[in-house]
Amino acid sequence: MTDLPHTPPQESPQGAPHGAPLLLDDATFGTIARFVPVAGSTTAADWVEIAALAEDLADGNVYLAEGAALELRGVHDQQELLARVSAPGLLAGTQPVLASPLSAAARAVARDIAAVVESLDVAANLRLGVDGGYGDILHEGLDFGAMLEGDNRARLIKGGALDKDVFSIEELVPALVQALEESDTLSATAAHGSGEAQHDRGAFEGERPALPIGWLAEHTREGIVDLGAGLHKGIIPAEFADLIGRLDVPITVTPWQGLIFHDIAEGDAEVVLRVLAPRGFIFDINSPHLYSF
C-alpha cells in the first residue's frame, strides 16, 4: 500500500454545511473531495451514497486516502456534490482522528474526541488518534492521542510517545483537551530546555503490527469474524463501492488504504470473500499487490 503525502486541508466553499467534505485543488487530479469519517467508521449507506457521487460527479472511483479518509477525484460540479451529500459518515467533520480498526473501544473513544476537538483551533492540522493497545496507531506518529489499557484505563500520547500518567476512560477526553490547550506552552518550555516531559519513548519500539488483512477472528465472539481487505493503490470503482454498501455491514477505513468488514457470520464471510476477491479486494497479507505501486 502506498504512503500518500499529507495534503494540507483547505476550506470548503463558503456556505458549505458544517462537516461537508474538504475540497482541494490538485494539479494532477483536478478538484478532490475528501471525506473524513471519524475513526474510519462508515455504514452501508455511506458507501452507497459515495458510490453514486463518484459515478455522477467525479472520475468514477472512490479512493482510500491518507488518514483513513475517502476521496473523490476529478469532481466537476462542486455545488451539486455539496447539495447531495447527506450520509452521516460522510458529514462527520474535517479533523481526522485515527483509531485501531479492530478495537470497537478505540473507535468509540475516537468519536468522543472528535466531537470535542472539531471546535478547537489548537487541534487543527494535528495528527490525533486512539490506539486500542496494539501499537498500530502509536506507530503512526501521533501528535496527541491515547492508548487504551484494559477496559477502563488509558494513557495519553504526546509527541508520539506514551505519557506515564494513567486515566480512567471518563477522565481521558478532558485530559486530552487540557494537554492540547497546554501544548503551545509545553513546546515553548521544551525549546528553552526546561521542564521534565514524562514520556515512555521505549514503548512499542520495533516492528509495526501486521496489517489487518484476511480472516480476523482473534478479537471477535465465536462464529463471527471481521474481514480485512486491501486495495491496490487504494482504488475502488464506483460499481464495487456500491456493492460493498449492499453488504449492509459496518465498514472501517484503515489508515493503511484498507477496509475492515465487521461482524460477519463465518458462513456469510466465505460468500463475501468469493464475491469480492475477484473484484480486486485483497485478502492475502502476502499479496505483492498490497505493496506494489
Image (spheres, rainbow, N blue to C red):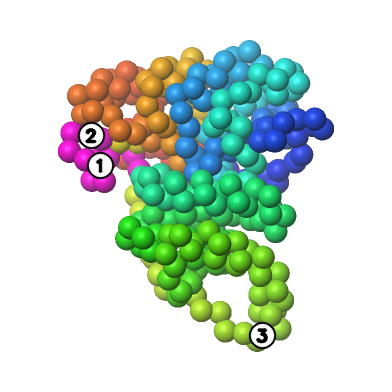
**Mark 2 to mark 3 CA distance (whole Å):** 52 Å
Q: Which residue is mark 2?
A: 224
**Mark 2 to mark 1 CA distance (whole Å):** 6 Å
Q: Are marks 1 and 3 in contact (CB under 8 Å)?
A: no
Depth check: give the residue in front, 75 or 245. 245
**Residues rendered magenta in the picture:** 211-225
Give the residue at the far left of this rendering.
Answer: 222
Give the residue at the far right of this rendering.
Answer: 14
Name the side, left or right, on which 73 lies relative to 105.
right
Q: Are marks 2 and 3 in contact (CB under 8 Å)?
A: no
What kind of element bears circle 1?
Answer: loop
Is residue 236 covered in magenta? no
User: What's the residue at 24%, 23% (across, down)?
Assistant: 268
Give the residue at the far bottom of this rendering.
Answer: 194
Location of residue 180 in the rendering, given as x and y in whole percent from the top left corner: 63, 64
User: What's the residue at 56%, 22% (across, down)?
Assistant: 50
Depth check: give the residue in front, 270 or 284. 270
**Mark 1 to mark 3 CA distance (whole Å):** 47 Å
| Crowding at mark 2 (Cα within 10 Å: few <14, some 14-19, many 20+) | some
Location of residue 253 in the rendering, given as x and y in whole percent from the top left corner: 47, 37
Q: Amino acid at mark 1?
A: Thr
| Crowding at mark 3 (Cα within 10 Å: few <14, some 14-19, many 20+) | few
Q: Which residue is mark 3?
A: 193
Labelled disc at residue 220: 1
Name the side, left or right, on which 206 lies relative to 253.
left
Location of residue 129 in the rendering, given as x and y in whole percent from the top left corner: 51, 54
